[in-house]
Amino acid sequence: MNRKTAVWLLIPAFFGVLVFTFFPLIEIAIPTFQSQAGFFSLYTQFLKSSYNWTVIGRTFLIAVLTVIIVLILGLPISLWIGRQKKTVRQVLNLLILFPMLTNAVVRNFAWIIILGRDGIINKLLLSLHLIKAPLNILYTNTSIIIGSVYLFLPIMINTLIGSVAELNVEIEEAAAVLGSSPWHTLFKVIIPQLATSILTGCILVFAGTMTAYTTPQILGGNRHLVMATLIYQQAMTLGNWQNASVIALILIVISALSMWLMKRLSYRLDRRMTNA
Amino acid sequence: MANLEVKNLAKSYDGKTKVLQDISFTIENGELVSILGPSGCGKTTTLRIIAGLIQETAGQILVNGKDITKTPVYKRNFGMVFQSYALFPHLSVFDNVAFGLKMHKLSKQEINEKVSGILEMTGLSDLASQFPAQLSGGQQQRVSLARALVTNPEMLLMDEPLSNLDAKLRLKMREEIRKLQQEMKMTVLFVTHDQQECFAISDKVLIMNQGRIEQFDRPENIFHHPRTEYVARFIGYDNFIPVNADNRQDSYHIAVKGTRLTTEENNENAKVLTIRPENIQLNADSTENTLTGTITGREYLGQSFKYTIHSELGDFQVEEARQKMRSSGDEVKLTLRAKHLHPLSE
Ligand SMILES: Nc1ncnc2c1ncn2[C@@H]1O[C@H](COP(=O)(O)OP(=O)(O)O)[C@@H](O)[C@H]1O
Ligand SMILES: [Mg+2]
């Protein structure tokens, strides 16, 4: 197939992206700049409110903490699964992806049962006399983070397993023979080789958590809004569509910027290892 | 550099199959010893146990008389060159080579000096800032050698280091390895399945078969005095004449099916006599160990011709360097000189 036909074949997809992704975005963006008070006035107004900054900060914090926890949990699990025989690996990978096939709302309600005042965790801690009164876990940042970790851990693991399986074990053995302890090998030999996949996993989890709606809605309640739930509140409860659009765009900019930064980092790592 | 003693090593991966059995040998300081054997005979397993990468089932490893069997791999201070080179893909050539020195907590200046020195020695100075993925196979091989040598290890372990290189480069690298080994007076254990390669560079050769040592000796001794039929076959003795007690006349004379054969070596324990194809003479002017046969097959080898000759003692493989090829069906006289006819006891 030559270049010319390839270009022709791409045209439908091009219009698809234009119509379904680009136009709606413009549609949202335009009104946010049409305020009488000035071009950016809606944005400056939004950013003047300290409450809004709290929400932005919370969204960011939850995303960052979720990424960190998912990575800390996901890396050892992936290292273990990635080193199994191919058939075992595939079965475990399926099991890990299985929760993603169930409905997100259902999964989050499961966490309400686990984390609530009368939930399993509180009952357990009370019966062990580790606490005197039930803990408030539900409807806090903590519960949102727990839900997000649960939601995105499979994605991280799934991203890492393939790369772990492809690692040449002799490279780690070479490090050991040269005097590298197992921990040193993990941090200086294994993780650097997985850097690109780790970054990819982080980008996916970060973007996912930043923009997730269901989990913070169900597990965060009304007092712990994140940007996605704030958008919903502005639009559906207050009917302030303009403001909702402003937040949406800010969210897009923050997510895109963070992803671009991570992507650049990963590109630099990648170039070193695969340049021929 | 040090001497290595391996005592009664045994290994089983699954608790049933014995991959190694009763492996014992000693490598003296400054020697290059090769382990030679077919694929799957346990060469890599032996090397990896010595390095400490896998656990032996039984036996001991001593370096300079000190038992290191329980020492973990990262505290053994060996150098190792892997078949896949196993370079760190995320580190430059310089940092690959510096890795072991950093583990030994050398100062930055010392590291710089040593790395530059070894890169110079292995002809890699210009590539110091390149990454492994940018290097050719031969260059990667050199980096892996430099990385193993720079820490001044007790001994160097090499697992088929040349098997991924093309024939020409393989010849060149094996000379380089030998030269480097002699200059630095290194103790080296070299694993290979290439007989020629191994005889060319080794002080001693250890021939392995199914997890056991068949013979451990200097290459020339193995070549001229193979201990077992297995070794003889492995190094190109193609002719085997089975003998038993009834055939024996005295310690130096055997009569098989009416043919009287004399050996120079004592044949008291012989189960079989062997001779190399190129050591059988055709139509020689001699009556020493002679028999007659008919040419049934022939092959052109370039320098020589190879014949299959049928005789009353069975088929013989004979290599003859001669201008003119003999014809199939020709009757010839074979002379098996006593000095080339080796009795084997196993
Ligand atoms: N990790 C392992 N688990 C089980 N069996 C193994 C393992 N490594 C090697 N073996 C078996 O041990 C035998 C010797 O293998 P190896 O030492 O690699 O031989 P070589 O290096 O001479 O080709 C082979 O039969 C091989 O199948
Ligand atoms: Mg091997």
Image (cartoon, rainbow, N blue to C red):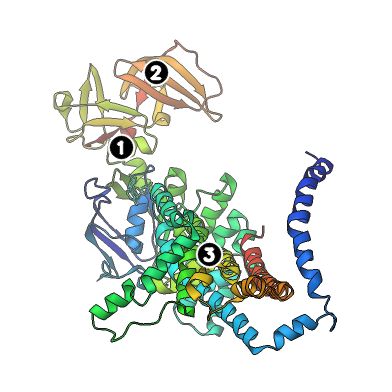
Mark 2 or 1, nearer chain start:
1
| Front one among B40 and B36 | B40
Q: Are marks 1 and 3 on the same chain?
A: no
Q: CA distance from mark 1 to mark 3?
A: 47 Å
Q: Residue placed at 29% from the left, 19% from the top?
A: B313
Mark 1 sits on what residue? Answer: B230
Please say if A127 is above or below A207: below
Secondary structure at numbered mark 2:
strand
What is the residue that sits farthest to the top in this orientation? Answer: B329
Left or right: B108 with respect to B238? right
Chain letter behind tag 3: A
User: x and y percent of residue B330 in the render?
Assistant: 44, 11
User: x and y percent of residue B25 in the render?
Assistant: 27, 56
Q: Is residue B241 visible?
A: yes
Q: CA distance from mark 2 to mark 1?
A: 22 Å
Q: Judge depth for marks 2 and 3 and give the one in front.
A: 3
Chain letter behind tag 1: B
Disc marking residue B309: 2
| Front one among B327 and A81 | A81
Q: Judge depth for marks 1 and 3 and give the one in front.
A: 3
Q: Quadrant of the N terminus of chain A?
A: top right
What is the residue that sits farthest to the left in this orientation? Answer: B246
Please say if A178 is above or below A83: below
Q: Quadrant of the C terminus of chain A?
A: bottom right
Q: Residue placed at 59% from the left, 47% from the top?
A: B168
Mark 3 sits on what residue? Answer: A194
Q: Name the quadrant containing residue B266.
A: top left
Q: Are marks 2 and 3 on the same chain?
A: no
Left or right: B89 with respect to B245? right
